[in-house]
Image: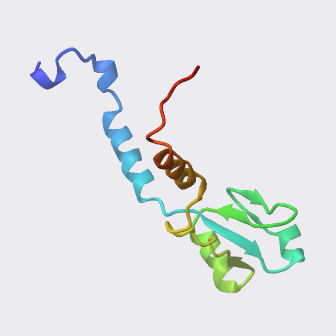
């Protein structure tokens, strides 16, 4: 028995290669795509084999697989653009105001009584 396997049972080592293979497969999976049906008729009829029907309104999140790519190519669904992320300059003013307030009153004593 080598030092690296010391204290491990055979049962705990079983399936290690499978787990590593599954982790690699999960890491390489493309990110899901948010799609919108082209019409209400398509919304009622079309469903993804793994994800199901569209909701009554709005978009659905589908995996970026061959089925989804074919539907995008034939125009039955369109990819929804993600909303723009807020810029870091657009922070709330409240934390800064509290900080300014502390600076203005820093010379006053902190007496609770």
Q: Position of residue 99 (x, y in %)?
A: 50, 49
Residue at x-position 60% and y-position 53%: 94
Left or right of 1 in this view: 110? right
**In this rendering, is residue 89 above or below 105?**
below
Check the image and name the residue furthest to the bottom.
Answer: 74
Residue at x-position 55% and y-position 48%: 98
Residue at x-position 49% and y-position 49%: 104
Number of callouts: 0
Q: Quadrant of residue 112?
A: top right
Quadrant (top left, top right, bottom left, bottom right) of the N terminus: top left
Check the image and name the residue furthest to the left.
Answer: 2
Q: Quadrant of residue 52?
A: bottom right
Q: Position of residue 7 (x, y in %)?
A: 21, 14
Q: Nearer the viewer, residue 24 or 85?
A: 85
Q: Position of residue 60 (x, y in %)?
A: 73, 63
Q: Position of residue 14 (x, y in %)?
A: 33, 27
**In this rendering, is residue 53 above or below 17?**
below
Colouring used for the render: rainbow
Quadrant (top left, top right, bottom left, bottom right) of the C terminus: top right
């Amino acid at each position: 028995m080598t030092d690296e396997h010391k204290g491990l049972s055979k049962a705990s080592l079983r399936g290690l290669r499978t787990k590593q293979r599954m982790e690699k497969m999960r890491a390489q999976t493309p990110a899901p795509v948010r799609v919108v049906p082209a019409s209400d008729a398509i919304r009622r009829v079309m469903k993804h084999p793994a994800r199901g029907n569209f909701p009554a309104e709005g978009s659905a999140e589908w995996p970026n697989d061959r089925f989804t790519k074919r539907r995008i190519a034939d125009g039955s669904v369109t990819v929804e653009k993600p909303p723009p992320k807020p810029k870091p300059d657009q922070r709330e003013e409240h934390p800064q105001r509290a900080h300014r307030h502390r600076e203005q009153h820093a010379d006053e004593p902190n007496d609770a009584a």
